[in-house]
């Protein structure tokens, strides 16, 4: 089971049952208690849930932040289709031979898989999964930014990563996050990831945000891209029409996949 899928299922289980012990979570997912503890520590550091003695539960005083979409039947991801549609639409914005920057996330990783078909391209990223998606595409030059590894998102973050991005310039930067609102733009729950995303944003001539319909109208703690810096938003057909129009009214060019 991939780490993102495992943590999605852990979060869904906690959200559905409230307090759950490490033992019960391990049994429910068929994994070891040590793996459960390691994943929950990372998720708690991202503000997604609260650790308790012997287990985990929702954060006190507020519902847990939805880092991933809730599971559908048989553990299926209900936004996998919209995410792929968004990635395909975003790939159509990229010009052959250009240099682009990709932040971490499942949607940007899906975009990377589309970019692997390009004949010539340079991709700058701090994401391990984006890099992996491009390993089999030797015609795509990949610049992997180093830094402190944040395992919960599979990406390098922190001052080293931010310094490495200084002086770089790409035609476009593609970023994802946990929420997009008219008031605050793109947000994410973690301060370290937000700071590195801001450095990625500064390196892109055009800022493109990839956000499926579950993220529109939601916001989390840390602002990544203020609304006035978002040039393009790519979302899917299930997006709320009123929210789309409100975002469009701010001057954002919106593409609905």
Image: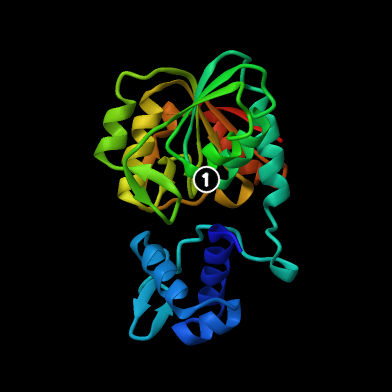
Q: Quadrant of the C terminus?
A: top right
Vertical placement of residue 188 versus 92, above or below: below
Q: Answer left or right for 203 relative to 106.
A: left
- The spot of residue 227 in percent (x, y) is 44, 33
Image quadrant for the N terminus? bottom right
Residue at (45% x, 49% y) in the render: 154
Say which residue appears at 41% left-offset and 55% top-offset: 151
What is the secondary structure assignment of the residue under circle 1? Answer: loop
Q: Depth check: 97 or 20 in front?
A: 97
| In the rendered image, the vertical position of residue 250 relative to residue 170, given as above or below | below
Q: Is residue 176 toward the left or the right of residue 151 in the image?
A: right
| Other residues around mark 1 within 10 Å, as few (<14) / some (14–19) / many (≥20) | many
Frontmost residue, 188 versus 193: 193
Q: Residue furthest top?
A: 97
**Rendered location of residue 111, percent (x, y):** 62, 35
Q: State which quadrant residue 51 falls in.
A: bottom left
Q: Residue at x 69, y 30 (%)?
A: 89
Q: Is residue 222 above or below residue 29?
A: above
Does residue 200 appear in the picture of this structure?
A: yes
Residue 49 visible in the picture: no
On the image, numbered disc 1 is attached to which residue?
105
Q: Is residue 121 above or below residue 3?
A: above
Seen at 70% across and 45% down, the residue is 82
Q: How many marks?
A: 1
Residue 144 pos. (x, y %) = 43, 32
| Nearer to the camera, 18 or 160 | 160
Residue 153 locus on image (x, y percent): 45, 51
Query: Coloured how?
Result: rainbow
* Corner quadrant of residue 246: top right
């Amino acid at each position: 089971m991939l780490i993102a899928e495992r943590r999605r299922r852990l979060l869904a289980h906690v959200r559905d049952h409230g307090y759950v012990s490490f033992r019960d979570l391990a049994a429910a997912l068929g994994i070891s208690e040590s793996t459960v503890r390691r994943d929950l520590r990372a998720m708690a550091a991202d503000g997604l849930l609260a650790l308790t003695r012997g287990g985990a539960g929702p954060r006190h005083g507020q519902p847990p932040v939805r880092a991933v979409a809730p599971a559908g039947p048989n553990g299926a991801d209900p936004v996998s289709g919209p995410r792929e549609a968004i990635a395909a639409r975003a790939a159509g914005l990229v010009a052959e031979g250009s240099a682009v920057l990709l932040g971490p996330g499942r949607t940007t990783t899906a975009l990377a898989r589309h970019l692997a078909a390009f004949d010539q391209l340079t991709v700058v990223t701090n994401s391990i999964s984006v890099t992996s998606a491009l390993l089999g595409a030797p015609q795509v030059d990949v610049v992997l930014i180093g830094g402190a590894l944040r395992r919960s998102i599979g990406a390098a973050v922190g001052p080293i990563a931010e310094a490495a991005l200084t002086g770089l310039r790409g035609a476009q930067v593609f970023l994802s996050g946990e929420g997009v609102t008219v008031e605050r733009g793109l947000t994410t729950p973690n301060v370290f990831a937000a700071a590195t995303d801001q450095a990625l944003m500064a390196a892109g001539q055009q800022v493109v945000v990839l956000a499926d319909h579950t993220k529109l109208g939601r916001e989390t703690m840390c602002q990544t891209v203020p609304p006035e810096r978002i040039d393009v938003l790519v979302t899917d057909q299930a997006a709320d029409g009123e929210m789309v129009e409100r975002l469009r009214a701010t001057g954002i060019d919106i593409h609905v996949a």
